[in-house]
Image (tube, rainbow, N blue to C red):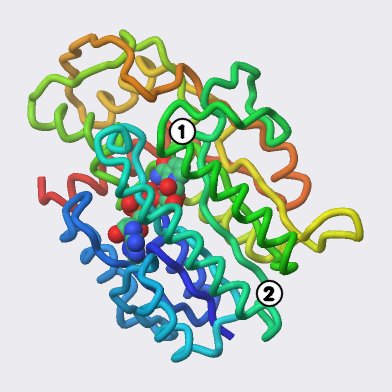
């Protein structure tokens, strides 16, 4: 049988597709290769997996109902869906909220409809990406899946929280085994150009100053891509059963459970680059939160999730990859 991976040309999607291929699964990847960041990077990621036994790719917009209906009809063998495609990024959601509405709300509904139509035909699991951004103004740390998530600080976070509510309704109405994964600041080789590991590395290597928001008074639970991939695959293998009282739906944090102060993290990037950073201190940005910190007890208990990569290990791997990718 076959796993459908959306956002397969994206950072996490490519790595998840690769891990599934590595264990002998058949993987269908879809992505619209949009220009939110350089599509050349998306094509280069695809080149990592295209040609592998068991992989095929379609350039498709998953928010396009007609295109998805045709795709759905052509692929009766899909028995699991890993929906990782989305319009990501906190800051851009303040500038372009409609892109988020289209990809994250319309797109999520189209994907859930596909799952609904298949559940009677043997769909085993619908796994989708949520985000630590759903915790928004939550001040309880570490962030637990039992905490309040009704105060998103960005429209991006609001769309991810909406995905969770939408998924609950479909799991409840149609019995679709569903798992939502709240990722915490994922980094590593093939990462995203709009995220700080890339932005900082790029500027340090090229001798340009970096902007440090809230004067560096922030902490992030940076999570290495291999740990995230292990969590996604473990989640895929554990569809929630549900019970007479509750629908078959689960939500997990996939974080590192070890937040790092922004200035310490910059020191690790400086060491990996072998160059000091020039810092420009800036005020807090709209939409940002002071700290993210994942409580991973439930993920550990139910999925065996156990992140192992310290930033002192993961950041040099990212910087090495970055230099190779840019032939520096
Ligand atoms: N990277 C992180 O730190 C992080 C943190 C929290 C949540 N997430 C979530 O994880 C998922 C994967 O994130 P990522 O970092 O790999 O982002 P990414 O931007 O690299 O990957 C997303 C992919 O989805 C594709 N896409 C977007 N809209 C589409 C559409 N309508 N149809 C088809 N393809 C479409 C994009 O072209 C892109 O390749 C996203 O849902 C994101 O919101 C990521």
- Left or right of 72: which side holds 320? left
x and y percent of residue 179 in the render?
65, 56
Disc 1 or 2, which lies upstream in sequence? 2
> Is there CB contact under 8 Å for labels 1 and 2?
no
Residue 123 in sight = yes
User: Is residue 305 shown above or below 316?
Assistant: below
Q: Residue at x 26, y 16 (%)?
A: 212
User: Is residue 145 shown above or below 265?
Assistant: below
Q: Mark 1 packing: few (<14 Cα in 10 Å), some, or many (20+)?
A: many
Q: Residue at x 40, y 10 (%)?
A: 217
Q: Residue at x 28, y 9 (%)?
A: 283
Query: Which image quadrant for residue 147?
Result: top right
Q: Residue at x 26, y 49 (%)?
A: 321
Q: Mark 2 packing: few (<14 Cα in 10 Å), some, or many (20+)?
A: many
Mark 1 residue element: loop
x and y percent of residue 255 in the render?
56, 38
Give me the disc on residue 124: 2
Give me the disc on residue 222: 1
Residue 10 in sight = no
x and y percent of residue 59 in the render?
28, 74
User: Is residue 79 shown above or below 126?
Assistant: below
x and y percent of residue 185 in the render?
44, 36
How many numbered marks, from 0 up?
Answer: 2
315 or 133, nearer to the observer:
133
């Amino acid at each position: 049988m076959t796993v459908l991976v959306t956002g397969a040309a994206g950072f996490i999607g490519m790595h998840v597709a690769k891990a599934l291929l590595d264990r002998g699964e058949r993987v269908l990847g879809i992505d619209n290769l949009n220009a939110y960041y350089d599509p050349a990077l998306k094509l280069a990621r695809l080149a990592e997996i295209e040609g592998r036994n068991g992989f095929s790719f379609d350039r498709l917009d998953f928010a396009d109902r007609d295109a998805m209906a045709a795709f759905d009809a052509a692929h009766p063998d899909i028995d699991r869906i890993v929906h990782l495609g989305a319009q990501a990024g906190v800051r851009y959601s303040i500038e372009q909220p409609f892109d988020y509405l289209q990809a994250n709300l319309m797109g999520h509904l189209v994907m859930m409809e596909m799952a609904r139509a298949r559940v009677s035909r043997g769909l085993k699991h619908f796994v989708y990406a949520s985000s630590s951004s759903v915790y928004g103004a939550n001040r309880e740390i570490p962030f637990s899946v039992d905490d309040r998530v009704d105060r998103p600080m960005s429209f991006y976070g609001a769309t991810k929280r909406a995905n969770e509510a939408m998924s609950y309704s479909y799991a409840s109405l149609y019995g679709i085994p569903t798992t939502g994964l709240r990722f915490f600041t994922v980094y590593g080789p093939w990462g995203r150009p709009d995220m700080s590991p890339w932005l900082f590395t790029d500027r340090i290597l090229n001798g340009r100053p970096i902007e440090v928001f809230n004067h560096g008074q922030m902490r992030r639970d940076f999570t290495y891509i291999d740990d995230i991939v292990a969590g996604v695959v473990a989640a895929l293998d554990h569809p929630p059963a549900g019970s007479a009282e509750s629908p078959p739906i689960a939500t997990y944090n996939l974080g590192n459970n070890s937040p790092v102060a922004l200035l310490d993290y910059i020191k690790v990037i400086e060491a990996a680059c072998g160059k000091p950073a020039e810092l420009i201190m800036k005020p807090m940005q709209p939409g940002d939160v002071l700290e993210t910190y994942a409580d991973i007890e439930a993920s550990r208990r139910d999925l065996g999730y156990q992140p192992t990569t310290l930033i002192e290990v993961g950041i040099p791997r990212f910087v090495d990859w970055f230099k190779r990718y840019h032939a520096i």
